[in-house]
Amino acid sequence: MTGKLIYLFLLVGCLSLVSCGNGRGGSEQSVPLTQDSTVLKVATLSRSTSYFNLQGKEMGYEYEMASKFANSLGLNLEILLAKDMEELVEMLSNEEVDLVAYPLAITNEYKGRVKFTEHEYVTNQVLVQRKEKNARLLNDVTELIGRRVFVVENSKYLERLTNLNNELGGGIEIQVVTNEEDEETLIKKVSEGEIDFTLADNNIADVNTTYYSNIDVHLKVGYDQRSAWAVNLESDSLCNVVNNWFSESKNNYIYQYLYYKYFKQAKASSGDYKKYIDNHTISIFDGLFKKYAPTIGWDWKLLASLAYQESRFQPMAKSWVGAKGLMQIMPHTALAMGVDSSRIEEPEMSVQAAVLYLKSVEKYFTSIEDEKERAKFVLASYNAGVGHVKDAMALAEKHGRNPLKWEGNVADCLLWKSNPDYFNDPVVRCGYLRGEETFRFVGEIMVRYLEYKDVIKK
């Protein structure tokens, strides 16, 4: 088991720019635990639906549920990441963890090795298709005959599609792609019109509908699969506590809130906002950008482009992850920069905090001599966190790319961090990342910056 696990200790208090963790407090335990009586050891997988790190903050539906459960017991939470479900089961069997906080498939084999909690998930595979004006959606699997469906090689999606094709007597055009891509990459391609169809588990598909409003995931193509959290076979008392907590969480809306946050709340900004006012003015905040940009040696127009990307120049904007203000600053980031977190919706406080943070991030990339190139790494870190960018640099070096160049090198490696083959690599410290978001974030800012330089005359 050594070398397979990534240990993330959740510490109370300050923001660490390079690490992937923050923390929770705790006191006395109320159930028998495997080791430290003040720590609940929880295993999960690094996925978009369970655990990931964004801007130095642990996130994920299963992670937040586990965190709230640990808090209810007055315990510190320690997260251990496994590579797959089999390893999760091994960790419970070996008493390395107290609890698996992941929808572990309820199979006869696993029933003999772990004890499942009563809170069950029901998942199934669905068809991901694009919604287009005046175009009819597929509503029956028989309509897949004669259609090309893309799936990853050696995946459960390929297995299901192959079986479905046999059940229908053939006719589905199955297009297999290498495992350098994953289901979320293929979903993005459906949204962008590059391909027409792919398959995904409905929970992953639901998450992606919050990013891509033009995809439809209503058509089931697989059988229901029951899954649940699990404990060691001998941990009856802990299992009972988990069951009771889930019942209570439904009554006080914790479960409903977190489900909405991750699976229903739109993640992309909406609305039509002007990128600039006229040929002399980008926004009413230009004075602030001009005042603070010299602190980091940036052209003020680049800082303005970042602000547009973050809030569309809306000072009262608030993101689904809790970032606020003109520059979408996380409260814990403001505190770490010595800025009053209660004032980050004030435009000047927001810009000041952003610049201080950008300055603190830049020191991690001093090996990149070209200032324009370095700015792209800093922007990526502003969006995802330094740790993820450092991971991408490590992957670039390992795979023969230039770790000091963005386009075609580190940018591509950042995209890989949504693929288990890469985010489980030993050189990767921070696990899963929806790299497409950061990739697009940097690209859109730089393109808009060039537009500002061309259009704005002063």
Image (cartoon, helix red, strand yellow):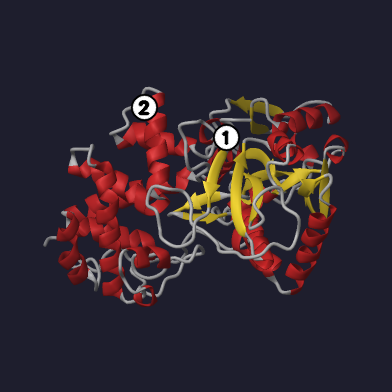
Name which residue lies at 79% across and 61% down: 241
Q: In the current view of this chain or complex, which residue is farthest to the top?
A: 400
Contact check, label 2 and label 1, Cβ < 8 Å:
no
110 on left or right of 344? right
- Comparing 36 with 446, the one in front is 36
- The image shows residue 447 at horizontal and vertical percentages of 29, 48
- The image shows residue 54 at horizontal and vertical percentages of 47, 53
- Comparing 130 with 20, the one in front is 20
- The image shows residue 137 at horizontal and vertical percentages of 69, 49
237 on left or right of 15? right
Secondary structure category for the residue under label 1: helix
- Quarter holding the C terminus is bottom left
Query: Which label belongs to residue 440?
Result: none
Query: Which label belongs to residue 420?
Result: 1
Quarter location, residue 288: bottom left
Question: Of the residues shown, which amino acid type is indicated by label 1?
Answer: Pro
Question: Of the residues shown, which amino acid type is indicated by label 2?
Answer: Glu
345 on left or right of 116? left
83 on left or right of 141? left
- The image shows residue 189 at horizontal and vertical percentages of 54, 40
Badge 1 crowding class, 10 Å Cα cut-off, few under 14, some 14 to 19, many 20 or more, is: many
The residue that label 2 is drawn on is: 397
Quarter location, residue 262: bottom right
Q: Is residue 280 visible?
A: no
In this view, 37 is above or below 80: below
Q: In the current view of this chain or complex, which residue is farthest to the left?
A: 458
Secondary structure category for the residue under label 2: helix
Q: Which of disc 1 and disc 2 is earlier in sequence?
A: 2
Mark 2 vs mark 1, CA separation in Å: 18 Å
